[in-house]
Image: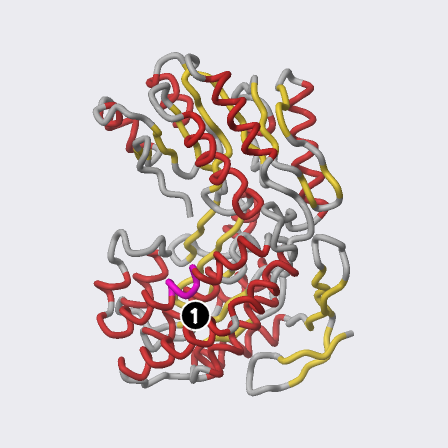
Amino acid sequence: MSVTNSGIAGEMLAQQSIVVRNPWNNEVITELATDGRKRVLEKLDAAWAFRPRLTPEARREILSRARQLLIQRKLDIARLISAESGLSLHDSVYKVDNACALLNHSMLVALFGQEAALCDGVLPVNSSLARHFCGALCGVAAVVTSFHHPLSRVLYSAALAIATNNRIVVKPSSKTPLSARALRMLLLEAGMPEPVFTLVNCADALFIEVAAAHYGVDFISFTGMETQAREMACHAPAGRLVMETGVSDALIVCADVDLQATAALAARGAFFCSGRRFGAVKRLWVDKRCHDEFVRCLAKEARAWRVGDPLDPQVRLGTMIDAVSAAETEQRIALSLALGATCVSGNERCGASLSATVLTRITPDMPVITGETSGPVVSVMAFTHVEEAIEQVNGAKQKLNASFITGDKALPVRDPDAMAENNLKKRFPGREHCR
């Protein structure tokens, strides 16, 4: 049993607990009380009953104060993210910086509304959520977030609610609930009315089921793995549930690029945030003419990603979310190796830690390609003609986005229909930007 703040009027409840552990050493960080069906319903009722009436200037001021508090407490919040999620401290600091940028964007939304919220090229935002908050709907938004982004997804949802005089009820991942709790306390300190942003601790399916049946909920957002999304879809009408899934991006490398610089770019795309962020590069198609040399460069880059305690500032690669996830990824690698793949770097696991892994001689039917392979693993395949690579990218089951790295500016427009199918983007050597 555990006693914890319920998130409504400071009421204290004693219920069954969620145990939050540090992935690095499996130590218990804390225990949080879970919410039953009745309590989830009460929180949704309270959010629906509240009607914020803040002026645009007041909303902007709350978000501005929140940004200042976040900057002041950057390192403390980054350490909290690393402790509960296993991300390296370096990556967690980046996450906090990104959260500050999201608050800047939300300040514009508070003043200028939908045009600022949906402005292309400003930030990679959840446009469905932005359209809900800036549109005519005035009901509660119910949001389920994943451990892949323990701070930014929660913050952007809450910041949009503040910016548009709306209310949001968030169910954070049970693996990483502490970042969301710290964020809520920070926003309250900045002046946010308490009912604007409520947290619940329960199973994802229970929350979506209750929210889908609630008269005051207009919008349900789910972020997570595809296997989870299928289950969630059974509990909510398609018209009200918006899902964001997938962790896999692809990269096509042509022979006319700087191989060392491109390998560094690919390594960052594959191993940043322990390779488990949405948009992580999992599949590389490399021109046969430079394949072997590129693999050598990539393996060298992978070995430079030091594994260790995520709270050590010298560590570049943190852990996966838990030992079970790391073992599942290790098993996918082992099955792929048994089918003929070759490991040129990494594939060393200790608990929830997995070293940066580079695989070659990959075929499309191998488990690392066909399934959701989370973690710092990248698979390299060779192509003879770029059209062949595009076809394989578009034919992959696991896909989110894809990019070219090439010196041929005319190349990406040769087959615009194929490009559009998988949201292929182009990059030119010498212009890549690594944060």
**Quadrant of residue 146 in the image?**
bottom right
Residue 100 is a magenta residue:
yes
The amino acid beneath tag 1 is Ala
Image position, residue 147 (x, y; %):
57, 55
203 horizontally vs 111: left or right: right
Coloring applied to the structure: secondary structure
Residue 261 falls left or right of residue 342: left
Task: Look at mark 1 in the image and give the residue it sits on.
Answer: 158
Alpha-carbon neighbours of circle 1 within 10 Å: few (<14), some, or many (≥20)?
A: many
Q: Which residue is drawn at 49% across and 71% down?
A: 169
> Is residue 335 shown left or right of residue 229?
right
Asked whether 50 falls inside the magenta stretch, the response is no
Query: Along the line of sight, which residue is nearer the eye, 214 or 58?
Result: 58
- At x 57% / y 27%, what residue is drawn? 299
Question: What is the magenta segment's predominant secondary structure?
Answer: helix
Image position of 25 with respect to 378: above or below:
below
Q: Which residue is drawn at 56% across and 48% down?
A: 228
**Disc 1, SS:** helix
The answer to whether 80 is drawn above or below residue 249 in the figure is below
The part of the chain drawn in magenta is: 98-102
Task: Pick the quarter of the image with the N terminus.
Answer: bottom right
Q: Which of the 4 quarters of the picture holds residue 330?
A: top right
Q: Residue at x 39, y 37 (%)?
A: 401
The residue closer to the viewer here, 133 or 285, is 285
- Give residue 17's position: percent from left, percent from top: 73, 69
